[in-house]
Each structure stands twice: as structure tokens, then as C-alpha cells.
Amino acid sequence: MPELWDLYDKYKSPLGRTAERGSRLAFGEFHLVADILAVGKEGKILITQRHPNKPYGGKWEITGGSVIAGESASEGAKRELFEETGLEANELDLRGTIIRPQTNSIHELYLFKGDFDESDIVLQESETVDFKLVTPKELYAMAERGEFLEYLYNRIKGVFPDILGESVKG
């Protein structure tokens, strides 16, 4: 069964239509994407390594993915977090929205603070191949070395400077 996305305008108003994942969206049509910065015990950030068969394979990132038809962005964020990491979030803090016309997407960026550690993580085989819990300084170093997706680090830096702390200035 194909994955369907609800379509929105740039103000996040529903257009009353859906599109199949992978189909070309028209100018002014957007789909929702949820990105989740998960912070566990000791303030460490959960990052996952992309499956080698996916675009940017082998790179590190935070959890995220497209919101499917019928879901709100926060419901999609909770589903993605659970599917990709096995973590269940009762509450998420919406921290920012980024509109990306070049990809016809509206990214909702959420913060999940949980009492989790490495033993709680269960990876989704087709999506991710590894995970790490890193400090903000370690994340910065990974971004500098090109191991963490640069565009994603820049989003995190812009939306979550309080989480990254001094490493943002690095």
C-alpha cells in the first residue's frame, strides 16, 4: 500500500488533497515532515546512522520522517520516534517550523526529553543501522568532520541553541 501525505499550503492550511510518496508536488503544495531531537539521561543527544541504501547512506542524523495522511505533525513525530528508535513519547515540545520550498516540505522540529539510555533503543532495520548518544560537543565535532548531515546540524543549531550550548559558538 502506498504511503500517502496530506497536502498543505505554505501556511500549513490543509488543501483537502493527498499525494503519494515520491510523486511530484505542484508549486505551493507542501507535505509535513517531523524532526525530533531526542535528549536522554545526562543531556546526551540520540543520533542514528542512515541505512547505506538510503540517500545520504552512512551519515548520522536525528530521528525524523514524513507525516502520513490523517496524522498531525506531533502524531507523526511520535510514530517516527517509536518506529526508528523504540522510544515512546507522551509529550513533545514543538520548537520550530522550517518551510523548504525546494523540497515542498514543512519541517516541524520537536524536542523530546526522556529518561532513556542505550538499553532502551531498538533500531528500525530498513531505516537505521546504528545509534549513539552524544554530547553537544561530540555532535559538533561530527558535523565538522562531515559525519553528521550538515543541513540537519544547521537546523538543530538554529532551533535548539539552548540544547547545544557552547558548541554552537564552536
Image (spheres, helix red, strand yellow):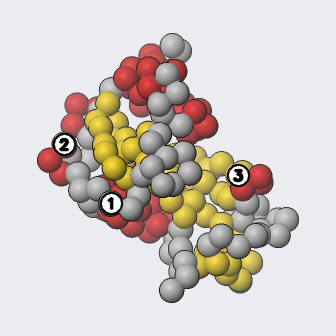
Q: Which mark is residue 117?
A: 2
Q: Is residue 81 left or right of residue 18?
A: left
Q: Amino acid at mark 3?
A: Ile
Residue at 28%, 36% in the rendered image: 133
**Would you say residue 158 is visible in this rendering?**
no
Residue wearing tag 1: 125
Q: Amino acid at mark 1?
A: Glu
In three-dimensional space, the C-alpha distance between marks 2 and 1, rounded to whole angstroms, equals 19 Å
Name which quarter of the figure residue 113 lies in.
top left
Q: Secondary structure at mark 1?
A: loop
Q: Answer few, some or many: residues within 10 Å of disc 3's Cα (few below 14, many 20 plus, some between 14 and 19).
A: some
Query: Residue extending furthest front?
Result: 53
Q: Looking at the picture, how far across and down is residue 75, in whole percent?
A: 44, 68
Q: Secondary structure at mark 2?
A: loop
Q: Nearer the viewer, residue 127 or 82?
A: 127
Q: Closer to the N terminus: mark 3 or mark 1?
A: 3
Q: Looking at the picture, how far across and down is residue 17, in whole percent?
A: 71, 83
Residue at 55%, 78% in the rendered image: 3
Q: Answer few, some or many: residues within 10 Å of disc 1's Cα (few below 14, many 20 plus, some between 14 and 19).
A: few
Query: Residue extending furthest top?
Result: 170
Q: Which mark is residue 99?
A: 3
Q: Closer to the N terminus: mark 2 or mark 3?
A: 3
